[in-house]
């Protein structure tokens, strides 16, 4: 099994560049009862998970910039690019580009297992607080793809 590399996916939102833990990109279309596509029903989103504790992958200033984009009162579109790399981190496997915006910005610390202060039973070690997912903090983003007439031509998937 191939090991994950530091540079397996790069996300760019305007001038903010970062390396997430995981980036999912999805396109879906609605269908009628006969299984035919319903016109103008296409939706597309990117789902991004980032460890903000690793400031080499996402700087604190870029984290704040993403939050500012997510809380904008106007409706500007941002140029978004997601580049997926092979295991070696050099060869580009694919790239998706689109105009869009941050639909979800969720900052959290993962659930902890174990209870602090508990002692062990009959010579066993006591419980310890550990993250169930191995991360101190987590940033989850949903990037919405704008698919109106002016933006749909900027929605591209290439190799």
Image (spheres, grey):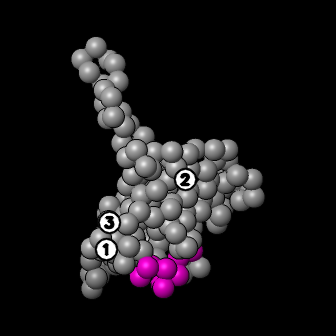
Snapshot quadrant of residue 131? bottom left
User: Which residue is at 34% across, 19% downward?
Assistant: 36
The residue indicated by pointer 3 is 75
Q: Is residue 149 magenta?
A: no
**Secondary element at tag 1:** loop
Name the residue nearer the viewer: 49 or 68.
Answer: 68
Q: Is residue 71 visible to us here?
A: yes
Which mark sits nearer the N-terminus, 1 or 2? 1
- Residue range of the region highlighted in magenta in the rendering: 57-65
Tell me whether the residue at label 3 lies in contact with that at label 1, contact meaning CB atoms closer than 8 angstroms: yes
Farthest top residue? 34
User: Which residue is at 36% across, 78% downward?
Assistant: 68
Residue 110 percent across, percent down from the top left: 34, 70
The residue indicated by pointer 2 is 97
Distance (Cα) linking label 3 and label 1: 7 Å
Image position of 122 (left or right of 61): left
Tell me whether the residue at label 1 lies in contact with that at label 2, contact meaning CB atoms closer than 8 angstroms: no
Q: Residues within 10 Å of mark 2 (few under 14, many from 20)?
A: some
Does the magenta stretch mainly form a helix, a strand or a loop?
helix
**Secondary element at tag 3:** loop
Q: Is residue 59 magenta?
A: yes
């Amino acid at each position: 099994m191939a090991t994950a590399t530091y540079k397996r996916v790069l996300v760019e939102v305007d001038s903010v560049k970062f390396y997430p833990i995981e980036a999912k990109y999805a396109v879906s279309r609605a269908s009628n009862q006969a299984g035919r596509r319903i016109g103008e029903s296409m939706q597309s989103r990117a789902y991004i998970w980032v460890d903000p504790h690793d400031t080499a992958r996402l700087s604190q200033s870029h984290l704040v910039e993403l939050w500012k984009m997510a809380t904008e009162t106007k409706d500007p579109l941002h140029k978004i690019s997601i580049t997926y790399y092979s295991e070696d981190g050099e060869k580009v496997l694919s790239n998706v580009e689109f105009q869009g915006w941050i639909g979800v910005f969720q900052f959290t610390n993962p659930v902890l297992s174990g209870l602090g202060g508990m002692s062990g039973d009959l010579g066993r070690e006591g419980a310890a607080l550990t993250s169930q997912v191995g991360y101190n903090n987590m940033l989850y983003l949903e990037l919405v793809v704008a698919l109106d007439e002016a933006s749909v031509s900027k929605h591209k998937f290439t190799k």
